[in-house]
Image (tube, rainbow, N blue to C red):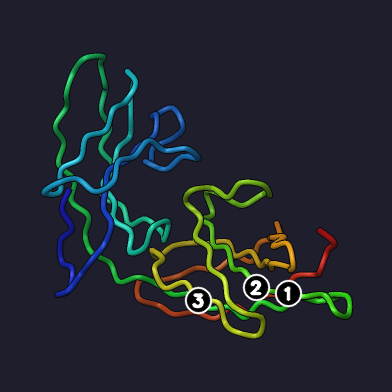
């Protein structure tokens, strides 16, 4: 797997991953099979027999958003080894900034952090475990949350917060959509109503 056109000093985590082709024409699915960091840009990924859509990827931070190569579809048979080359063209990352406001918190309630969760439109957050494709960050109350590692595309933004003293995390499930272009920085300030943990 190689990245082309990257600027000097480029540093990223890279890998290869994929999904059974039955879920659609892309290499994206809720629980992709993937492998990270191989020697010399080589990766070994064990897959069950079947038809797979595979792509190389890089991410600028762990779970920071994946920049994908074109998808390759392959038929995998048990006991075989398939050698594939993937090329991911470098694309400048996009940045989203958001000051998250928590409304309606009781007097004396400690808000330790505000949270910003960004998910690709294909994988909305509906509560519970966050999809692996989502990216999250935190900031002290009143400070702007910032995620600067996102690929261009359509994203869904979810505000959240952490209360003390027992670190209760709350993330809303009502999304604010945003469309990012390569290298763009966009501000979307969000609010979330306080709810008892």
Q: What residue is at 67 percent from the left and 49 percent from the top?
A: 126
Q: Which residue is mark 3?
A: 146
Q: Hey, which residue is sitting farthest bottom in the picture?
A: 142
Number of marks drawn: 3
Residue 15 higher or lower than 50, as above or below: below
Which badge, 3 or 1, is on the more N-terminal residue? Answer: 1
Callout 3 touching callout 2 (CB < 8 Å): no
Callout 2 touching callout 1 (CB < 8 Å): yes
Which badge, 3 or 2, is on the more N-terminal residue? Answer: 2
User: Residue 114 got which mark?
Assistant: 2
Q: Residues within 10 Å of mark 1 (few under 14, many from 20)?
A: some
Q: Is residue 10 in sight in this rendering?
A: yes
Residue 124 higher or lower than 64, as above or below: above
- Spatial CA span between label 3 and label 2: 11 Å
> Could you say whether the residue bearing mark 1 is in a helix, strand or loop?
strand
Q: Residues within 10 Å of mark 2 (few under 14, many from 20)?
A: many
Q: What residue is at 54 percent from the left and 62 percent from the top?
A: 118
- Spatial CA span between label 2 and label 1: 8 Å
| Along the line of sight, the residue nearer the viewer: 99 or 182 | 99
Residue 80 higher or lower than 154, as above or below: above
- Spatial CA span between label 3 and label 1: 18 Å
Left or right of 185? Residue 195 is right
Q: Hey, which residue is sitting farthest front in the picture?
A: 165
Q: Which residue is mark 1?
A: 111
Residue 26 in picture, x, y percent from top left: 38, 41
> Could you say whether the residue bearing mark 3 is in a helix, strand or loop?
strand
Residue 66 in picture, x, y percent from top left: 37, 55
Residue 80 in picture, x, y percent from top left: 18, 18
């Amino acid at each position: 797997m190689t990245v082309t056109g990257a600027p000097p000093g480029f540093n990223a985590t890279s890998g290869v991953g994929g999904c059974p082709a039955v879920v659609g024409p892309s290499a994206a699915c809720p629980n992709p099979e993937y492998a990270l960091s191989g020697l010399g840009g080589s990766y070994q990924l064990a897959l069950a027999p079947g038809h797979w859509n595979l792509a190389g990827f890089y991410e600028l931070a762990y779970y920071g958003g994946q920049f994908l190569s074109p998808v390759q579809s392959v038929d995998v048979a048990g006991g075989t080894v398939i050698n594939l080359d993937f090329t991911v063209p470098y694309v400048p990352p996009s940045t989203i900034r958001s000051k998250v406001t928590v409304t309606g918190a009781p007097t004396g309630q400690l808000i330790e952090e505000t949270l910003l969760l960004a998910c690709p439109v294909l994988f909305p957050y509906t509560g519970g475990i966050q999809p692996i494709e989502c990216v999250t960050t935190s900031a002290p109350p009143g400070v702007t949350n910032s995620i600067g590692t996102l690929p261009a595309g359509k994203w869904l933004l979810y505000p959240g917060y952490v209360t003390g003293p027992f670190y209760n995390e709350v993330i809303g499930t009502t999304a604010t959509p945003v469309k990012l272009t390569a290298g763009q920085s966009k501000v979307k300030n969000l609010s979330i109503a306080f709810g008892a943990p």
